[in-house]
Structure formats: structure tokens, C-alpha cells
């Protein structure tokens, strides 16, 4: 962070640090009562008279953060008038801004507590080097070595690889129809699903070089427990988990719907139809954009003032006959839904037949094969209306030159009769 200025700035800016010189230290000793404590690191950013300081606590592998340890560091930061405590581990919070470890909230009155997952650190490093750029070639090389290290299987910077200890019990209860909202582990599974969507977003953003985030309503952002309750209710009543991913400049959100009873996952996007043209013209507009998409995609059409999808069909059939999606030509098609369904694994970890890999593969493939190729419709700009004089002039210019005295076939008869 201190060696590569752009990378250090990218990591510290979201937490209120100024754009200044970054100094980093490891295992700085502090005394609390009779105890000597050694936080893993300390970051100081200086710009003029402004100084921003944060303590760092790091965990690798499956080691979790500990509440008592963090509370001690919050006390140190308060006494030293530091600004924040930042933790780094493989834990991924379900919602941005949340911390994966519960601490006494009274200790957060004067010191902020932030969290970085190793996946986030790796994502920032890749995006800075490959897409935003690093001015100094030597610094770019150093950042490349960090990326190489973090991507190594033995670095301790693991990817999202577990749906929790409660996953198997919750999964089986859903399929048996016996799950209750009060059962142990239900809330944990719901939270892990949101964490999985956040991991999928970071992974996709790393490939695209842009900020990809899970989509949440304003209420869900301000009241995270409402999101958890929604997932729990859906899981208990329908056996489903649902969420959405926002990719900048796309026609719509990448929606993910998991049905644990049917053992499948559906990725879909809703697209507004053109506001002019016949029904089949609007269908063909969509089909042309899906020329390289799989034949098995399901396309649904929604009409104005209609409830639910009016028609649906597979892309292979719609390519041959656009009228498959036109049930009533008198009704206006307002939007389409393009969806792809695939099998979902049931294992809690990673690898073949795992739930996590099923979701990651489904989202990556849907974006590559469908979403990145879709563009929103826009009306043609209005044309300037020509005046009558301009229309006459244009017609005259387009007509061949014919002299008023030129002969025609009709003139032969007139000449013969006068001859």
C-alpha cells in the first residue's frame, strides 16, 4: 500500500483517509493496563495538517476475527485518537458496510470499524493494475507480485468456499417441506447466500474491470434485517433464495433465483421493449441481439395492462417464428424477460456438484452469453420537417434534365399530321 500509491489510495479512500502520503507499520506495540498488545499493522495517511490513522487486524485461511481482540484495539484507537480499526480476513459480510464480527457498539462512538475481505483486496489490486493503471512501471510490477501471491492456493487468501455448517440441514428440511423460520441455522444460510452474491459480484467485477455490486433496495440498505427476513420467508414458504447483481451500463439487473426444491437456478434479466413498431418487429429487435445466445434460453413477453407473462417460448422456436411470442396482435408488448435455467448442486463447499460453483458458473455464463450483448432501445431522433419550397427543390434536383422543347414519342404523330 505504501509502495504503490494508487493502490493504497483505492483501499483507504472509502474510509475517509485524505489523498496524501501513506505510511505503513507492522506489529506496533501498545500497552492496555498491564497487557502488551501488538496489532498486526498501522496505517497513517498525512496531507498537510490532516492525519488519518488506522489499526489493522489480519486473519488468513479459515481463522475468524475475535470480538474481544477487536474491542481491545478499538480501546487503543480511542485512547490514541486514531480514526479507525480495519480488519482483513476471508469473511465476506452479506451487506456492504456491515462487519462480520459483533462488538460492543458503545466502543464505536469515536472510532470506526471497517472490514476488507481478501477477495476485495485482490479485486482492487487487479482493477488498479489491469484497468485503472499504475503510473510507475516498478510500482506496477510490485502490485503484480501481490496479485500473484494472493492468487496462490497457499497464500491463505481463500475464496468463498463454504455455505456454513447449517447448510445441509436447512437444504434437506426445505426439500422435505419441514423447514420453519425459527429453526437453527436458517438465518445463517440466508446471510451466506447474500455473501455468495457479493463474492460473485467481486469476481465478475474483477473480470470486467468495473464496480459490480449486489442490488438492494434503499430500505434493505438502511435496515439489513429486512433483507434477511425476506430471504427466510421465501426459503420457508417456497424453498427459494433470490437476489440481484448490478453491472454498470447494462439493460437491467442480473437476477438470480434459486429453487432448492426443484434443484435449479435461474438467471434472468428484464428488458424494456421498443415503444414503436408491430409486435413481431419488437420481438425481432430482441432476437437479433441474441444471435449468439444458446437455443435453450426462455423468452417471455409482457403486454401493456396485462398480468404476468402473456406468452413464452424457447429462443430456438422464436428465431424461426417471431409470432410465437405474439398471442394478440392488438396488444402492445411492453417488456421481455430473458432467462436461463440450469441445475444447482447441493454440496456446501466448492467443486463438482457444489452449490457455490453452480451459482458462480450460472452468473458468469449468463452475463457472457446474454447480458453483455443486450442494448436498450432508443427512438430514432426526429427529422427536421422540410418546407414546401425545399421539397420542390429536392424533387427538381432528383428529376432528370428535360428541356421544355425536347421531342417525345407523342410528337411524331403531331408532326406527321402537320406534314
Image: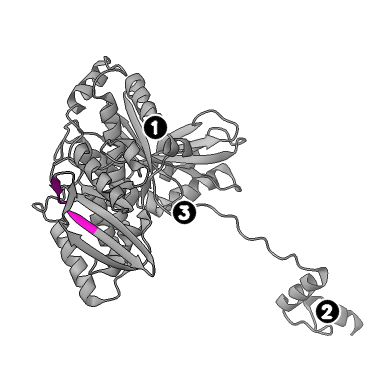
Query: In this orientation, does residue 307 appear?
Result: yes
> Measured along the vertical axis of the image, is residue 175 above or below residue 257?
above
- For residue 402, what is the image quadrant? bottom right
State yes or no: discs 2 and 1 in contact (Cβ < 8 Å).
no
Quadrant in which the C terminus appears: bottom right
Quadrant in which the N terminus appears: bottom left
The residue at 28%/63% (across/down) is 8
| Mark 1 crowdedness (10 Å alpha carbons): few <14, some 14-19, many ≥20 | many
> Measured along the vertical axis of the image, is residue 291 above or below residue 144?
above
Q: Residue furthest top?
A: 178
Secondary element type, mark 2: helix
Residue 265 tag number: none
Query: How many angstroms separate mark 2 from mark 1 (CA)?
Result: 88 Å
Eye-nearest disc, 2 or 3: 3
Identify the residue under disc 2.
Answer: 411
Secondary element type, mark 3: loop
Eye-nearest disc, 1 or 3: 1
- For residue 245, what is the image quadrant? top left
Residue 227 tag number: 1
Q: Residue furthest front?
A: 34
Query: How many angstroms separate mark 1 from mark 3 (CA)?
Result: 30 Å
Query: In this orientation, does residue 39 appear?
Result: no
Amino acid at each position: 500500500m505504501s509502495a504503490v500509491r494508487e493502490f493504497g489510495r483505492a483501499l483507504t479512500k472509502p474510509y475517509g483517509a485524505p489523498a496524501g502520503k501513506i505510511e505503513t507499520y507492522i506489529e506496533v506495540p501498545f500497552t492496555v493496563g498491564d497487557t502488551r498488545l501488538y496489532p498486526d499493522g498501522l496505517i497513517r495517511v498525512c496531507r498537510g495538517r490532516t492525519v488519518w490513522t488506522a489499526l489493522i487486524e489480519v486473519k488468513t485461511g479459515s481463522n475468524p476475527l475475535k470480538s474481544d481482540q477487536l474491542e481491545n484495539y478499538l480501546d487503543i484507537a480511542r485512547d490514541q485518537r486514531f480514526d479507525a480499526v480495519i480488519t482483513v480476513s476471508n469473511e465476506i459480510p452479506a451487506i456492504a458496510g456491515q462487519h462480520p464480527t459483533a462488538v460492543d457498539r458503545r466502543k464505536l462512538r469515536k472510532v470506526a470499524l471497517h472490514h476488507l475481505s481478501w477477495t476485495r483486496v485482490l479485486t482492487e489490486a487487479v482493477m488498479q493494475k489491469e484497468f485503472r493503471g499504475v503510473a510507475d512501471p516498478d510500482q506496477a510490477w510490485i502490485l503484480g507480485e501481490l496479485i500473484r501471491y494472493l492468487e496462490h492456493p497457499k497464500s491463505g487468501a481463500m475464496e468463498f468456499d463454504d455455505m456454513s455448517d447449517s447448510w445441509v440441514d436447512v437444504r434437506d428440511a426445505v426439500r422435505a417441506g419441514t423447514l420453519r423460520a425459527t429453526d437453527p441455522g436458517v438465518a445463517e444460510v440466508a446471510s451466506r447466500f447474500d455473501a455468495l452474491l457479493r463474492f460473485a459480484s467481486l469476481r465478475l467485477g474483477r473480470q470486467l474491470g468495473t464496480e459490480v455490486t449486489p442490488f438492494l433496495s434503499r430500505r434493505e440498505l438502511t435496515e439489513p434485517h429486512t433483507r434477511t427476513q425476506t430471504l427466510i420467508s421465501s426459503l420457508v414458504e417456497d424453498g427459494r433464495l433470490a437476489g440481484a447483481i448490478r453491472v454498470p451500463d447494462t439493460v437491467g439487473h442480473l437476477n438470480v433465483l434459486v429453487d432448492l426444491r426443484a434443484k435449479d437456478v435461474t438467471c434472468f434479466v428484464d428488458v424494456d421493449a421498443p415503444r414503436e413498431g408491430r409486435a413481431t418487429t419488437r420481438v425481432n429487435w430482441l432476437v437479433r441481439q441474441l444471435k449468439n445466445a444458446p437455443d435453450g434460453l426462455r423468452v417471455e413477453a409482457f403486454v401493456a395492462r396485462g398480468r404476468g407473462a402473456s406468452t413464452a417460448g424457447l429462443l430456438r422456436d422464436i428465431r424461426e417464428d417471431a409470432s410465437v411470442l405474439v398471442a394478440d396482435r392488438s396488444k402492445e408488448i411492453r417488456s421481455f424477460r430473458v432467462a436461463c435455467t440450469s441445475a444447482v448442486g447441493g454440496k456446501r463447499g466448492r467443486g463438482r456438484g457444489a452449490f457455490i460453483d453452480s451459482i458462480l458458473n450460472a452468473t458468469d455464463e449468463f452475463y457472457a452469453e446474454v447480458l453483455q450483448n443486450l442494448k436498450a432501445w432508443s427512438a430514432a431522433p426526429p427529422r427536421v420537417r422540410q418546407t414546401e419550397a425545399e421539397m420542390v427543390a429536392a424533387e427538381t434536383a432528383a428529376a432528370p434534365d428535360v428541356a421544355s422543347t425536347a421531342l417525345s414519342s407523342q410528337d411524331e404523330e403531331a408532326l406527321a399530321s402537320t406534314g
